[in-house]
Image: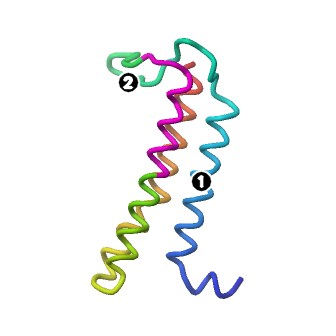
């Protein structure tokens, strides 16, 4: 356990991966996949913006997975060049995953 705490970047990426995994589980188990019409985007000002099939909600965790992979790869590539860039790419990951989870919860409530 102590070796993990020496590498906070690995801990941050691992925690973000767990959040993304939780989002995948929630999307696949809680959201109505078989509905022909589901609200996929809602804004306070104009209301429902986008209605699609229920299975299209998997785009949300897919975007999270792509961001996780791309940011981790870019941070790994920049690890020797810029410590600040590494932490920008790594540090944003949990924030983005929490935002995606919050967006899913709001969409689930609207549907």
Judge left or right: residue 68 versus residue 44: right
**Vertical side of 31 occupied by 16: above or below:** below
Colour style of the rendered protein structure: rainbow
**Vertical side of 111 occupied by 74: above or below:** below
Name the image quarter holding the C terminus: top right
Name the image quarter holding the N terminus: bottom right
Say if the magenta span includes residue 64: yes
Neighbours of disc 2 within 10 Å: few (<14), some (14-19), many (20+): few
Q: Residue at x 59, y 24 (%)?
A: 109
Query: At numbered mark 2, what does the secondary structure look like: helix, strand or loop?
Result: strand
Q: Residue at x 63, y 81 (%)?
A: 4
The residue indicated by pointer 1 is 19
Image depth: mark 1 or mark 2 in front: 1
Where residue 110 appears, x then y in whole percent?
54, 20
Q: Residue furthest top?
A: 36
Task: Give the residues in magenta.
Answer: 51-65
Q: Residue at x 65, y 87 (%)?
A: 3
The quadrant in which residue 49 appears is top left
The residue indicated by pointer 2 is 43
Name the disc covering residue 88, or none. none
């Amino acid at each position: 356990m102590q070796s993990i705490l020496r590498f906070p970047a690995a801990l941050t990426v691992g925690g973000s991966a767990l959040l993304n995994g939780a989002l995948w589980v929630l999307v696949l188990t809680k959201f109505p996949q078989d509905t022909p019409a589901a609200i996929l985007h809602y804004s306070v000002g104009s209301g429902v913006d986008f209605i699609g099939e229920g299975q299209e909600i998997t785009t949300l965790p897919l975007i999270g997975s792509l961001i996780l992979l791309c940011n981790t790869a870019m941070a790994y590539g920049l690890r020797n060049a810029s410590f600040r860039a590494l932490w920008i790419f790594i540090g944003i990951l949990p924030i983005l995953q929490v935002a995606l989870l919050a967006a899913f919860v709001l969409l689930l409530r609207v549907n």
